Image (tube, grey):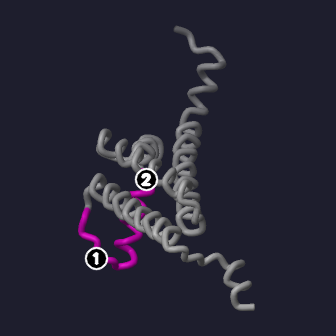
Amino acid sequence: MEENIIHKWMHNVKPYFKNLCGAWYMYLHLCLAIFSTIIFLFDNNVYHLILLLNIIFLDSLGCIILSDCPLNIFEEKYTNTSMLVERMKCYANFGIMYKCSHKFECTMELLINVATLLSIKIVMLIAMQIFGINFHPSTMIHTLL
């Protein structure tokens, strides 16, 4: 098969395309983590939090089936590193005694901890609704006046 201009161009562009794909998956992973954290910290809507818990459950299920986070797999495929590997390096650089070096265990530990904290927040919000406890700043100002 003869090389035409398209084959030559694709051969030259392929390394850049690989890096672009890796960056895409890394930013996708980062956005998912950041927006999930924002929802967890600042949203008190129980239904939103349950939806976030379901997303974490699906990610955990994917981790169990694939033995690693699906986004980590794509990150490593294209960039030879992942957010998990970088996080483990960060722990080591800060001198945090973190002995676990298995990626699957680290990923599952993080997801289980986040799911547990999220579940506690959901249960606390439901209990507050049951007992009529309200911590909204606008209602607290009116009660003080």
**Residue drawn at point x = 34 percent, y = 56 percent:** 107
Q: Amino acid at mark 1?
A: Met
Label 1: few (<14), some (14–19) or many (≥20) C-alpha neighbours in 10 Å: few
The image position of residue 120, as x and y in percent, is 41, 67
95 is higher (above) or lower (below) than 68: below
The image position of residue 62, as x and y in percent, is 37, 42
Secondary-structure class at tag 1: loop
Marks counted in the figure total 2
Q: Which residue is mark 2?
A: 82
**Residue drawn at point x = 60 percent, y = 78 percent:** 135
122 is higher (above) or lower (below) than 141: above
The image position of residue 87, as x and y in percent, is 41, 64
The image position of residue 82, as x and y in percent, is 43, 53
Of residues 80 and 35, which is closer to you in this image?
35
Disc 1 to disc 2, C-alpha distance: 21 Å
**Residue drawn at point x = 36 percent, y = 64 percent:** 113
Magenta stretch: includes residue 92: yes
Q: Quadrant where the C terminus lies?
A: bottom right
Of residues 54 and 37, which is closer to you in this image?
54
Q: Amino acid at mark 2?
A: Ser
- Disc 1 and disc 2 in contact, CB within 8 angstroms: no
Of residues 138 and 48, which is closer to you in this image?
138
Q: Where on the picture, by quarter, is residue 67?
A: top left
Look at the image and give the residue range highlighted in magenta.
81-100
Q: Which residue is mark 1?
A: 97
